[in-house]
Image (cartoon, rainbow, N blue to C red):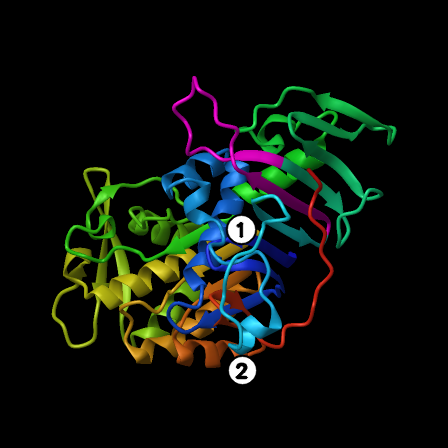
Amino acid sequence: MIHTLAISGYRSIRNLVLPLARLTVVTGRNGTGKSSFYRALRLLAEVAQGRVISSLAAEGGLQSTLWAGPEQISREMRAGTQEIQGTMRRKRVSLKLGFASEDYGYAIDLGLPIISSGSMFTLDPEIKAEAVWTGDVLSRRNAFATRVGPAVTGLDRAGRRQTLITSLPPYDSMMTHAADPREMAELLVLRERMRGWRFYDHFRTDAEAPARASRVGTRTPALSADGSDLAAALQTIIEIGDRDRLSRAIADAFPNSGITIAQSGGKLELLMRQHGLLRSLHAAELSDGTLRYLLLLAALLTPRAPGLMVLNEPETSLHPELLAPLARLILQASASCQIIVVTHAKALVDELSAAGAQSHELSKSCGETVIEGLERISWEWPSR
């Protein structure tokens, strides 16, 4: 389980180190940085997939995603007695992301590229430093793999530090290019764990939504990010998951209702029985809110729970009466995996917090995303 998450220099997040629990709720008013927080988590996961550089380039490059405020914010600026203005920069420009879990920690430092006259990839940031360690906080004593520039060093089986790679390109992470199962098994374990993280963000429910169409189905223990395999995911829960729990969850949200999965020509289609209707409704006929809830249900009742699941604004298009059943569904799912919920629905926040979820409310101070009253947590970034 991840117990600490750190973000520095990303959009409105100048420097944020916050604790995470088995179930964590991140909330706040519009414009306080919830989307930036969610995107930063996605970027961290992209490192293990080898896509962090391309993802940042797609956002307009590092210059478009960096903290846009002054390097330092004085007390006078926060009090409004001094105009907010920049000063001579003393530190290097960087975007840093990291986390610490019960066994391993990881952090990455991305900086501005060195412009090459022969390259057209000027939006690509460069990976300046990385580190993997054991324990809560990175130090020279507990780091077993570090990357500075193109060089990667790590501990061998005898505990001796050795150079693993001397010329790692600035666009490649050591997480994908130094994970040797013989010498760097820890990197491999951590990489595969991060690759298993799941993110669900604004399922489509329009008339052309992938979840509304019948599709060829195979066993699907993990719902895809776009929900296109909804029928297959629900049938997988019925066959190898907790079928009774699925039925109870549907009845909790939609009393006297149920679902069946029909098969025709190798394609699977979702049908829903609703109280008072003489026939089942096809997925194409379901309301946006009903379809979205079924998508969330398939994600949360997965037979193969990931190490981390992140839900971004799951309340979108849901009727207020569905928020309490959704909260109960999330609470049950958090028994088998760590969950982070990013939401601005107060009713959902209240339901989850009352049941023991850790809650962080984001706010803005001089343009910076902060959490008022958050106790300082020890954290160290890898050195360049």
The amino acid sitting under disc 1 is Pro
The amino acid sitting under disc 2 is Ala
Can residue 358 be seen here? no
The image position of residue 241, as x and y in percent, is: 46, 54
| Numbered tag placed on residue 306 in the rendering | 1
Magenta residues span 103-128
Q: Nearer the viewer, mark 1 or mark 2?
A: 2
The image position of residue 343, as x and y in percent, is: 42, 69
Q: Where 215 falls versus 241 (above or below)?
A: above
Q: As drawn, which residue projects farthest toward the top?
A: 118
Q: As drawn, which residue projects farthest toward the left?
A: 278
Q: Does residue 145 appear to the left or right of 327 in the view shown?
A: right
Q: Does residue 256 appear to the left or right of 65 in the view shown?
A: left
Q: Which residue, given by chain and number where applicable, does mark 2 sit on? A: 354
Instruction: Provide the secondary structure element on which disc 1 rests.
Output: loop
Q: CA distance from mark 1 to mark 2?
A: 25 Å
Q: Neighbour class for label 2 at 10 Å: few (<14), some, many (≥20)?
A: few
| Numbered tag placed on residue 381 in the rendering | none
Q: Are marks 1 and 2 in contact (CB under 8 Å)?
A: no
Q: Where 162 falls versus 38 (above or below)?
A: above
Q: Nearer the viewer, residue 265 or 38?
A: 38
The image position of residue 76, as x and y in percent, is: 58, 74
Can residue 226 be seen here? yes
Q: Nearer the viewer, residue 368 or 190?
A: 368
Q: Neighbour class for label 1 at 10 Å: few (<14), some, many (≥20)?
A: some
Q: Residue at x 40, y 55 (%)?
A: 200
Query: Which of the 4 image quadrants contains residue 319?
Result: bottom left
The answer to whether residue 121 is magenta is yes
Instruction: Provide the secondary structure element on which disc 2 rests.
Output: helix
The image position of residue 321, as x and y in percent, is: 32, 80
